[in-house]
Image (cartoon, coloured by chain):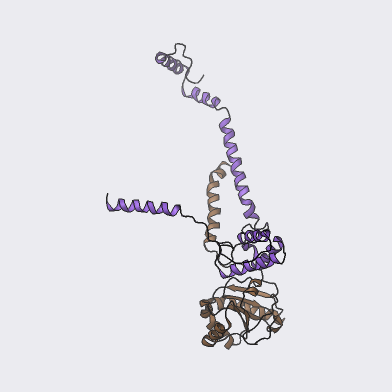
Chain colours: A purple, B brown
Amino acid sequence: MNVSAKFFGLTIFFVFLAMFQPIKAQAQIDVFDFETPEQEQRYRQLSNDFRCPMCQNANLSSSPGGVASDLRREIYRMIIEGQTDAQIEEFMLARYGDFILYRPRLTAQTLLLWFARNIIRNSGVKKSNDSQAKADAPINQDTYVVADDVISDEERKRLNRLLAEHDDLAHAQDNTGR
Amino acid sequence: MNNFKLFLPVIIFMVLAVFMWRGLYMDSRTLPSVLIDRPLPEFQLRSLELGDRLVTTADLPDGPFILNIWGSYCLPCLQENPIFMAAKEQNIIPIIGLNYKDRDGAARDWLELNGNPFDLNVIDDTGRYGIDLGVYGAPETFLVDANGVIRFKHIGVINYRIWEDEIMPAIAAVQTGGNS
């Protein structure tokens, strides 16, 4: 085994190793006391649902950023104060805007984002329906016309004779499509 | 009609290409602030200068001013400090500091060492007021008009080009707006 083959094998090995690494983001650990398990559940849910404005590709629960931990503390405070999830979302939106939501609200600006996929998908469905209908339609009629154009009656008779000679079936019919 | 169908993939490609080309040059790291044209949020905080007395929005300048979020740990804040020092020397506009998630001692040392362009340094050591401002990291710079309304925000370091091209025109707009 030469060197490059060895190197190649090693590369494959490491690629596989990397593929099977657990890539789950590490959750940040805060020490908060909750009065009920529901409150803790809501805290976990909310800090998973908001996006960290600093790290941008992490939610609040997995971001090590300073502002993320501040915002988690605010979520905790508001839950203990008895605010609803909607109120907490309102608080975040008033300060950081739509960016903080992973699921953007339906506004004039996000209209395209919400419905472009439907438009694209529907146009695609229509197209494939059209071509499906075409495929299902009887195409034989066209084939006959072409066959009639290409060969004359004499040629057809000769063709049938030749085919019949080589055909095992004694009662071979017209093989040109009729 | 058939010709149009033939060119449809090309048209779709062109539209996508335009979107993606624009996307290459869009800055996704700076969020548009939702606080533009909103009043500066109220606060009651300590300051580096006034000891135990809590300062509020009433202690801020009556006319337009710059509110700069900074910290002694923040390297870009050090980079933009000479620009604010020059602005202070030329009396362009009052500059208020918001000492963000810092320690008082470290902040005082930093100002003594690097120069203090700020008329007042409000202390937000917990970062709670920063959340009200939609701040997600120093430095950030707000421009507040004479009515206490936020008119402009810059996220990240200010260099001379940004100062000349963006901040100065915004200051001019706010100052003329305040006088009329």
Of the 4 image quadrants, the one containing the C terminus of chain B is bottom right
- Residue A41 relative to residue A153: left or right: right
Toward which corner of the image does residue B169 lie, by quadrant?
bottom right
In this rendering, the answer to whether A18 lies above or below B169 is above
In this rendering, the answer to whether B27 lies above or below B157 is above
Of the 4 image quadrants, the one containing the N terminus of chain B is top right
Toward which corner of the image does residue B34 lie, by quadrant?
bottom right
Find residue A5 and report its horizontal and vertical position in percent: 31, 50
Q: Nearer the viewer, residue A110 or A154?
A: A110
Toward which corner of the image does residue A33 lie, by quadrant?
bottom right
**Farthest-out residue, top:** A170
- Residue B169 relative to residue A162: left or right: right
Find residue A58 and report its horizontal and vertical position in percent: 56, 62
Find residue B99 and report its horizontal and vertical position in percent: 60, 80
Q: Nearer the viewer, residue A154 or B70?
A: B70
Find residue A118 and report its horizontal and vertical position in percent: 63, 48
Q: Nearer the viewer, residue B172 or B144?
A: B144
- Residue B100 relative to residue A80: left or right: left
Name which residue lies at 57% across and 88% down: B89
- Residue A86 relative to residue B113: left or right: right
In this rendering, the answer to whether B28 lies above or below B129 is above
How many numbered badges does the structure rendering display? Answer: 0
